[in-house]
Each structure stands twice: as C-alpha cells, then as structure tokens.
Image: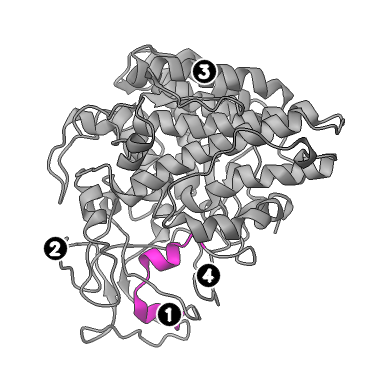
Amino acid sequence: MARSIKFLIAVFAFILSNSACTNLDEELFSSINSEEWYSTEHECTLAMGSAYAGLRYRGTSLWGLYGTEVVTTDEAVIPVHTNGSWLDNNGVWRNLHKHKFTPYQEAINASWEMCFNTVANCNQIIYQVRNSPAQFDGKEGMIAELRTLRAWALYKALDLFGNIPINLEFEDTSLPSQISRTEAFNIIETELLESYPLLQESPISDYYGRCIRPVAFAILAKMYLNSEKWIGHDRYEDAKIMCDSIINRGHYTLESNYSDNFIAENESSREVIWAMPHDRVIGDFGFQMHMYTLHWALLDKFDLNGTWCWNGICMTEAMYDSFSLEDNRREGWEVGPQFYFNGDPVWGYEGGQLTFTKEITNLDASPEGEGVRCFKWEMPQGLNGWETMDNDFAFFRYADILLMKAEAIMRENGNTESSDASVLNLVNQVRYRAFGNDSHNYTSITLDELLAERGRELAFEEVRRQDLIRFGKWGDEWKFKPQSEPYKELFPIPNNVLNANTNLEQNPGY
C-alpha cells in the first residue's frame, strides 16, 4: 500500500488512539523551546504526521465523526440486537438516530475534539515549521498544506456546530470567543484561497492522504454549495467553479467498477480525491466496519481473531429499498442467508441459519438477523484484536464532485426539476457506472431524486447529514424518529468544552 502518510502518522497514532476514548482535555503549551524546532526538511515533514493522526480515529470512527454524520441520518440505524453480540452503549446510538442530542454524547464530544485538536496541532506545527532554521524549497507549501488541513477541520466544526471559536495563532493563549457562522465561513474561505496556489497540484504517490490542491477545491465547493443554508447567501456559481477546478484538471475519473473505491487496496483508485489511510500494521483503531456491522457468528468466516463484532450498524429499510435491483451499488449491502466461503450455512444463536432481513421491527430489542449489513467496504481477513481495516476512507470522491456540480447548476437556475443537458450529463456519468449501461439514465431529474441518487452513491460516507440539511429533509419523520426541531440542525457544544471556556455559549435549544 502507499505508505508515505501512513508512516508519518504511525509515530503518533498509538498514543492518540489509546487516549482517544476517555481523554477529552488537551494540554496546551504557550511556548516551545527553540531547541525543539525542527532543524531539517525531513523533521518538518515527519511533524505533519501528528496533525493528520487525529483524523485516523475520530475522523472515521463510530465514536467520532462517523457516529455524528451517519447514525443520525435516514440511511443508518443501530438497533439493539438481542443475540450475536450487540451495540447499545446506554442508548446513545438510538438517541442519536432519534435526534435526541445532548452535550454529553461521546460521538459529539469526540467530533468537537477532532476538529479543534486538529486546529491546535496545525497551529503548533505551522509555528514550528515557520520558525525552523531549516530552509528548503517546499517550506511555504508545507505551511499551506497545514493551513488547508486546519481549514478542513474548521469547515467540519462550522457544519456541525455553527458559531465556533477560531484561533489561528499558536502564541495566542487567550480563550477564544465564538464568532458568527458568517465570520467563520469567511475566515475559512480566506485560508483556503490563500493556501491552494502553494499546494501540490496533482495526486502523486508521495502526497497520498495529504491535502493537495484539489482537496482545497473540494472543501470550497462544499462550503459554497451549503452557503445559502449556512449563512443566507448563495454561492452556487462559485461552487460550480470549484467543481470545475477539479473536473477540468483531468486528474480524476470514475472507476469503471464502483466497488474498487472500497477494496482493501483502494489507494490506487483514480476517483478518490482525499482519503484517510488505514493499515492494520500501524496499530489499533481507525475504520472498523467489520466490528460495527458483523454478527458474532461471522468471526470464523473472516478469520477474525480476538475481535469483537457488535452486530450493530445497519442500513435502513427505506434506504435499501431506494436501490433498483439492477443497481450494482446494491451489492455492497448484505441481505439474506449467510454462508461460509465453502457454501456451508452460518448458524445463528436464535435457532436456524443466520439470515439478514431488511426490516427492523424493534429498535430496542431486535432479533439477531434484522437489518441490512454494510459490506460496501471489502471485509478483512485475519484481523487481530482491535486492528483497523486496511481500506482507506475517502473524505472526497470524484462522483460527489459531479453530483455537486449538477446540484449547483439546478439551484442557481432555480430548478426543482431539470432536463438541462449539462445536469443530466453529470448525473448520468454516475448513473451509467451504477448500471453498466444507459438504460437507467435520467431524461429529467428533480432535486428530490438528486438527493436520492446522492444517497445511493455516497451511502455511509459521512455526507448524508449535510445533504439532508441542505435539501430541507433533516427534520422529517422517518422510522423510529419523530419530526425534529430546526435547532437540531446543529449539535450541542459539549458540556466539558463550555466548562473549560466560559466565553462560549451553548447553541440555542440545548
């Protein structure tokens, strides 16, 4: 596998992973001895690993962004299965799905921590690199890369929490105050616009998993597409420009096989714009879909040793039913009787063959086989203990960019339905790949259908929450969830954060 960034983060990953579950407080330093500044280009490069490392656990874990971005939506649910192991955690996953948010829920707390620890780490490393005696050609580009990573973390905080504190100076030890969402938006935009010209332009192997120029374009495209919802000012033309800045470069294309984006060795995908690299040799935690979704009885099938499988996360029945039978993306979701690779049946714990059904009858006490399981990411063989899967997790994919541009065109033109050739061409590129031919191409498309297509293409990839809010569907009633209030478009600021910084105010409604 591509190892450049994987070994950069390896130095820091073990420490961060083992403290991530319980330690939500960060030790901040007001100064650093000049003798600790990085004295060579190599040392500066290695230092960036600590800035990326925090994303590895909190960015793709159920107990971090994955919980807040996926379980809270109409695409995923975690029922309490009565057998085959289970995932309850005192009702936190059921409450997140029902939009019963509190300032004490671990996934929300860890999401805040991921965002602002990343900002703090970037601040420190930018300061040290900028003041390092080392002089080399890529120094300003390195600082720009760290600014871009920091901007991404702030973009996520802006999305999740609204009015946020921003401090971009390592030497400033004062407690930051909240600023408005508009002010924060403008700061993040400026950081990205100033940084991207200095970033690595093309996706070469040495920059795999790092923030290069198309990553900055993708963040800006997301911000501009959500601008009307977030700050009351539409930026759809700018969203199109940012999408075109990726599309017209010719670096990316749709993989001919959808599943190639999710195999264990997926770092060669021509579709992935930015991914969080995962590799079992680095250490514990990371991306553990096998643990989240598999029934305990499947441990032997996948030769999982000393590993817990929680028989937990499932796709909702409504989302699964949105796939046509001919849609090859449906193959990533497991329904039906379970077999070993030699064809022998896998026996469940409630009598008979283990069989997954699409229907979930009871969120609080569900039979062991209820719920569509996630096989979208290739299931690993031979993992030990809590090792992460090897599949790299894509934060941005080219298919998303195509669908975003189509949406921006429709919204800019005021269309709730469109037969515009440019819109159809963009969406039908994704649609053609999904079916292998043009028999299911759109001849016209509504915004509601575009949202449904985004759901099928990007399911479980940490985009659905933002999409539902932008399309005005977040508060809708769905199975096991009543209609929720508009204030729940933002999560509560964690209580420990409010206690630590009295300049902050809780989001309205909490």
Left or right of 291 on screen, residue 324: left
Q: Is residue 364 above or below residue 171?
A: below
Disc 2/disc 3 C-alpha distance (Å): 45 Å
Left or right of 43 on screen, residue 295: left
Residue corresponding to mark 3: 187
Disc 4/disc 2 C-alpha distance (Å): 30 Å
Q: Which mark is residue 362?
A: 2
Q: Is residue 126 above or below residue 456?
A: above
Q: Amino acid at mark 3?
A: Ile
Residue toward you, 500 or 38:
500
Q: Residues within 10 Å of mark 3 (few under 14, many from 20)?
A: some
N-term mark: 3 or 4: 3
The quarter of the picture where the C terminus appears is top left
Q: Which residues are magenta?
A: 285-301
Residue 425 rendering spot, x and y as whole percentages:
49, 29
Secondary structure state at the residue bearing disc 3: helix
N-term mark: 2 or 3: 3
N-term mark: 1 or 2: 1
The quarter of the picture where the N terminus appears is bottom right
Residue corresponding to mark 1: 299
Residue 398 rendering spot, x and y as whole percentages:
55, 37
N-term mark: 4 or 2: 2
Q: Count numbered badges in the picture.
A: 4
Of badges 1 and 3, nearer the viewer stands: 3
Secondary structure state at the residue bearing disc 4: loop
Q: Amino acid at mark 1?
A: Leu
Residue corresponding to mark 4: 380
Whether residue 465 is visible, yes or no, is yes
Q: Residues within 10 Å of mark 1 (few under 14, many from 20)?
A: many
Q: Residues within 10 Å of mark 4 (few under 14, many from 20)?
A: some
> Looking at the image, which residue is at 47% across and 27% down?
222
Disc 3/disc 4 C-alpha distance (Å): 41 Å
